Image: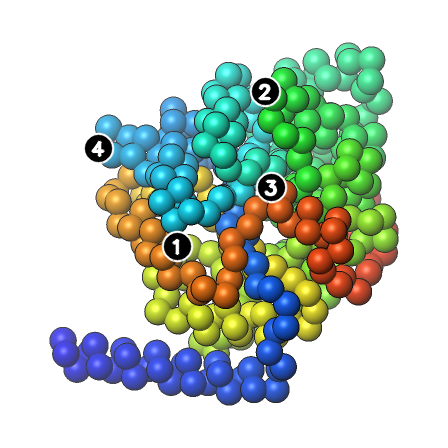
Amino acid sequence: MERLAALTMTLLMVAVSITSSLNVRNPPYEGQKYLIITIDTEAQSPRQSNDHVQRLIYGNFSDGRAGILEMMDEADQAGVQLTFFVDVLEDTLYPGEIREVLRTIHARGHDIQLHQHAYLIPDETWNDWQSDPHWHHHEADPLHKIDCWDEETADFVFEQMISVLEEENIPLPVASRGGSYAYNEAILNAMAKHNITTSFNYEPQLRKDYFNEGTQPMFKWSNGIVEVPVTYIPVPWTLSGLDRLDDTLWSSWFLNRHFDSFFDASNGDTVAVMIFHSWSFLELVEHKDGEYFEYSNDKKVKQFSKFLENIPDDVEVITATDLADKISDGEFEISTEYDVAKVSNHCTNPQ
């Protein structure tokens, strides 16, 4: 066992050494280093058999609980704010429950932004919407896939999401992330219309079928929206040479090197964006009728707590709202711009 531990440590140190050597050519990042910890907050029906909000958002089971309340507890203890990308449209599926989630997060002082899994919206809701005076008629089927939306549909649905936040007295959103990082030109234009100034959609590894220019710092779309890419850290142990900043790095011993590696390789002003979900403290368990997230123990809660303790001193945790304010104040030099028309509608012009 001691030999195995020694060998593991040796391999880790070799990996760190290789990572350091890979970054020798990159000048040190000169700006302030920021981290946004984002939680996609959703109760997707395929991920549990029942009690979806209680189980997939609160992580509440008969033998224990590990969900967004524990996330906020640990963040409060560490003195940082989290950014919750809440699937507000699920209010149509779980009426009242999603609004309570919004109220709970807001009361705790954490950030709320928009997230969308449109396939979860019931057909009855689509039918009701199409009788609304503001609705422009479209065929219903493709609307369940958000990267099929045209601007009229995107504009209408963003109005519905924003109205929920307004009714709950929650600050208006400044950021949006599509379910499975789905987006298109119409969505980006609708965001601009509603003063949602930052997009957290660009995922260059998992969504290679989308607009893709490889790993990028923050960049602008031609309509003024700022894109905040998902963070990939340069590492030597993957085929791509990159590892996503998510819960797989909670227990990493080398956070200082990871963050230095990311920022030094950024080639421009950027922020680190950490990805996880409201069910990230749970375990995926296989059943006869599917795989469901379930409570096992509080191991991941403790790992997250340790991660927060080990965030490097030169990395400041901010929220999506903080970032939008800093962009507005001119703190970042965002020099790269791409034509928003490059993000096609995937129903009419698949890439």
Q: Are marks 2 and 4 in contact (CB under 8 Å)?
A: no
CA distance separating discs 4 and 3 = 30 Å
Closer to the chain start, of discs 2 and 4, is: 4
Closer to the chain start, of discs 2 and 3, is: 2
| Label at residue 179 | 3
Q: Position of residue 118 (x, y in %)?
A: 63, 32
In this figure, which residue is indicated by the disc labeled 2?
A: 168
Report the quarter where the N terminus lies: bottom left
The structure residue drawn at horizontal position 36% and vertical position 45%, both measured from the top left corner, is 77
| Label at residue 308 | 1
Q: Position of residue 188 (x, y in %)?
A: 77, 43
Closer to the chain start, of discs 1 and 3, is: 3
- Give above or below for 309 relative to 182: below
Q: Are marks 4 and 3 in contact (CB under 8 Å)?
A: no
Report whether residue 28 is seen. yes
Q: Secondary structure at mark 1?
A: helix
Counting every numbered tag in the picture gives 4
Identify which residue, 255 or 281, lies in the foreground. Answer: 255
In this figure, which residue is indicated by the disc labeled 4?
A: 63
Closer to the chain start, of discs 4 and 3, is: 4
Report the amino acid beneath label 1: Leu
Q: Position of residue 146 (x, y in %)?
A: 69, 38
CA distance separating discs 2 and 3 = 23 Å
